[in-house]
Amino acid sequence: MSELILHHYWPSPFAHKVRLALGLANAKWLSVEIPRIPPKPLLTSLTGGYRRTPVLQIGADVYCDTQNIIRALADFGFLSAIFPEGCMSKALAFSAWIDDTVFELAARVVITNALDTAPSEFIKDRGDLYFELGWTIEKLNHDLSSVVLQLDAKLKNIDDILTCGGNICSKELSYADVSVAYLAWFLRGRWSDGPKVLSRYPNICRIENAVCNCGEGQYQDLGGQEAIKIANDNTPKSLVGIDSSVMTELNLNQRVGIRPRTQSSDPTVCGALRYLDRQRVSINNTEKEVGAIAVHFPISGYEINLEV
Ligand SMILES: N[C@@H](CCC(=O)N[C@@H](CS)C(=O)NCC(=O)O)C(=O)O
């Protein structure tokens, strides 16, 4: 069986989320470290241009976006470890709320607080990825106290869900709890007020500790070039076809472009449609050195259009 290869950098909160899920599964995986800002030529030759972090590679199949990565891990054999008691849909819905709403506020707070200390090219790169078109440093600073109030309201909401002593949506820890833990990890480690704010939420801290105690699985380092060789030595093994339940006029092998639905500097990734169901879209791509690869995205949160 092909190995799990995670392309990531250690300070990435979304990568941490996947590493914690690998910990719940006690999975073995290979760790390829990628740069924090572009250019990332080794990564993008595998992804067709997608530059975000993390990315999961299984042979010549490349999974972009954490929600898609987690589904791939469930398909790989970790369904009950990551989603115990059949909680997959609930856990993914909760996790999407954390990512889209709560993490978005947390990123604003962390980045605004780092404006004077982080390198300006990092701030510009992340601002163009995460914030509305035309964002400015002045507006970020002006909005900070209001965003902190918003974030705190969400943290209280999460803590309240946990007051009866259990986990978010199952008796065993699940991906929903991982979502709480990565958010707390990010706030604690990257915002000077994070530890103080979190200390008011004992249930969030309880889940953070419980998930952290499961570790990050067992990993070994791998070079980026070696990962490319693995892709080249393999052919994509994932499904081909358009599921009959999908409402679409797209046809197999048509050229499509895929990008996040939000306004952002993310590039459009293009390729020939390989697979489509109600949760996942896959394209075929061929790159020199990498050979034939299948790149997979979630449907939710992404635009899929004919290539123009
Ligand atoms: N929706 C994506 C978001 C991923 C994301 O924004 N990751 C951050 C790092 S935590 C990122 O890509 N930052 C820019 C970069 O690494 O180049 C997912 O769930 O994977």
Image (tube, rainbow, N blue to C red):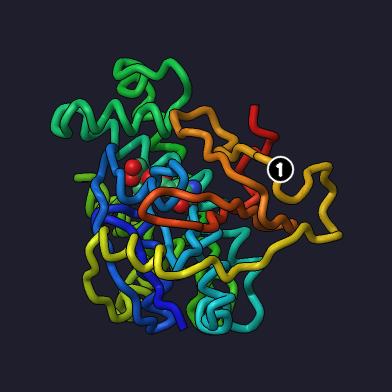
Residue at the image point whose x is 78% and y is 43% from the top: 250
| Three-letter code for the amino acid on which mark 1 is drawn | Gln
Between 275 and 87, the residue placed more toward the observer is 275
Residue 275 in the image: state x and y as whole percent: 69, 57
Residue at the image point whose x is 59% and y is 66% from the top: 91
Residue 254 in the image: state x and y as whole percent: 71, 43
- Residue extending farthest to the left is 117
Between 233 and 131, the residue placed more toward the observer is 233
Between 116 and 145, the residue placed more toward the observer is 116
Residue 21 in the image: state x and y as whole percent: 43, 72
222 lies above or below 52: below
284 lies above or below 166: above
**Which residue is identified by label 1?**
254
Q: Give the position of the C terminus as an image quadrant.
A: top right
Q: Is mark 1 within 8 Å of ligand 1?
A: no
Residue 61 in the image: state x and y as whole percent: 50, 63
Image quadrant assignment for residue 291: bottom left
Left or right for 137, reference 76: left
Q: Secondary structure at mark 1?
A: loop
Report if residue 128 is visible in the image: yes
Residue at the image point whose x is 69% and y is 34% from the top: 306
Q: Residues within 10 Å of mark 1 (few under 14, many from 20)?
A: some
Left or right for 28, reference 9: right
Residue at the image point whose x is 30% and y is 59% from the top: 185
